[in-house]
Amino acid sequence: MNAWPSISITPFKDLDLPQLKIKDSNNDIIAIDSKATFRMYVCGITPYDATHLGHAATYIAFDLINRYQILAGLDVHFVENITDVDDPLLVRATRDNVSWQDLANQQIELFKSDMSALRVIPPKDFIKVTESLPIIENFIKKVDSNGFLYSLEGDYYFAVSEFLSTLPMTIEEAIKIFAERGGDPERTGKKHKLDPLVWSANVGNDPGWNSSYGYGRPGWHIECTAIACEYLDDGISDPIITIQGGGSDLIFPHHFMSAQIIKAAYGRSFSELFVHAAMISLQGEKMSKSKGNLVFVSKLLEQGVDPMVIRWALLKGHYQNDRNWSEDLLNQAQIEVNQVRQALAQSEVFESHQLIQDIVVDLSNNLDTPSALKRLIDWSIKSKSSGTVNQSGAVSRFIDSTLGLAL
């Protein structure tokens, strides 16, 4: 489907961009090879409530990576899915007495509007699960033909037992988290407690589709693997993509299972790096629908909050550190955005070449946005008292291209 309007990135011919280094969730900081093609897959929303600040923080983080690699001159292929059929969506649609398709489309449009306001560059491919059923079915067939699929009372499971050597926790811990995040470890008849559902037989009035595996719908993990491989696999690369991204709540089971399913289907690794954005909390508690403490971007925008202030506030914390959202954070972000805007409005500012190069180094070092914003504040203070050069336009274009801050 169509994403939101694209954003042009201003090239900087004389800019020295160091190799991008990113913290892999399973390893240490890794320098990304400067290959001609950079492939990134980021897990998208389930459109029943969009877009809360946890979503925004995640997509802004991967937007920074996207921007950096575009500026570095790489051929960037960025894919994002939309899980537009899933239990939470169906539950809310039933509760609100609306069709699940209408609810999904409404929330997708809201998400697109929020991303556009926050100046997130859209993915090259923005893919609905419901538009990808043939792709998903063909991918399931690959897993099946390699002997890793089995049937249980009309449902189909991926047999994961051969792929647990890299499990990032004990089996006991994994089973507990698996149950908390949509798995069914205690179902009678499964070969292994951690086997994930690949195709679910239709139940009641839930939506379903005809397939070689009966009338039903795909499981969560198989959706992303099928879409990612369809749009990003060149047939020879190992790993298939450069970055698999999402929120830290996807580390297990979703991203772990996705990687194992792809090994089963292709005998290749999925991603060079698994990168995750941390959680946003409100008053010390993780934002979640169950707690009723979600803060929505659209609501802030309706209240007249500048989207660039929201973006600035989220950039003030490191994307891989859990952090707290508060009115104080938002108010401080407004003060600092105004301060930088005042500097950019001056005809003469403090020398900016070193500022630009230092911020580039910060971003290359695992997206160190707190340091980058601090440099920008220091520069604005110096510009107020010691402005001598006409370089505000260069700074404005630079922070728009790299940080996504149109000030």
Image (tube, rainbow, N blue to C red):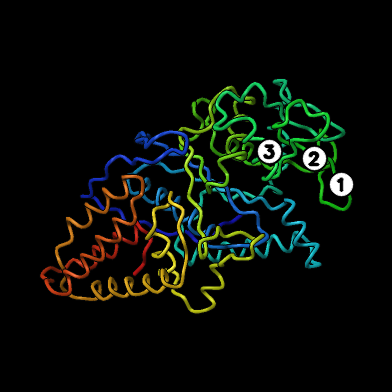
Question: Is label 1 in a helix, a strand or a loop?
Answer: loop
Cα separation, mark 1 vs mark 3, equals: 23 Å
The residue sitting at 53% across, 58% down in the picture is: 54
- The residue carrying mark 1 is 203
Q: In the picture shown, does residue 10 fall above or below 106?
A: above
The residue sitting at 48% across, 42% down in the picture is: 40
Q: Residues within 10 Å of mark 3 (few under 14, many from 20)?
A: some
- The answer to whether 19 appears left or right of 313 in the picture is left
Viewer-nearest residue: 392 or 370: 370
The mark nearer the N terminus, 3 or 2, is 3
Camera-nearest label, 1 or 3: 1
- The residue carrying mark 3 is 135
Residue 126 marker: none
In the orientation shown, which residue stands out farthest toward the bottom?
A: 304
The residue sitting at 33% across, 75% down in the picture is: 335
Dividing the image into 4 quarters, which one contains the N terminus? Answer: bottom right
Say whether marks 2 and 1 touch (CB < 8 Å). Answer: yes
- The answer to whether 21 appears left or right of 59 in the picture is left
Camera-nearest label, 3 or 2: 2
Q: Amino acid at mark 2?
A: Ser
Question: Is label 2 in a helix, a strand or a loop?
Answer: strand
Q: In the picture shown, does residue 132 fall above or below 63?
A: above
Cα separation, mark 3 vs mark 2, equals: 16 Å
Q: Residues within 10 Å of mark 2 (few under 14, many from 20)?
A: many
Cα separation, mark 2 vs mark 1, equals: 8 Å
The mark nearer the N terminus, 1 or 3, is 3
Q: In the picture shown, does residue 337 fall above or below 55?
A: below
Say whether marks 1 and 3 touch (CB < 8 Å). Answer: no
- The residue carrying mark 2 is 200
Residue 92 drawn at (x, y percent): 75, 61
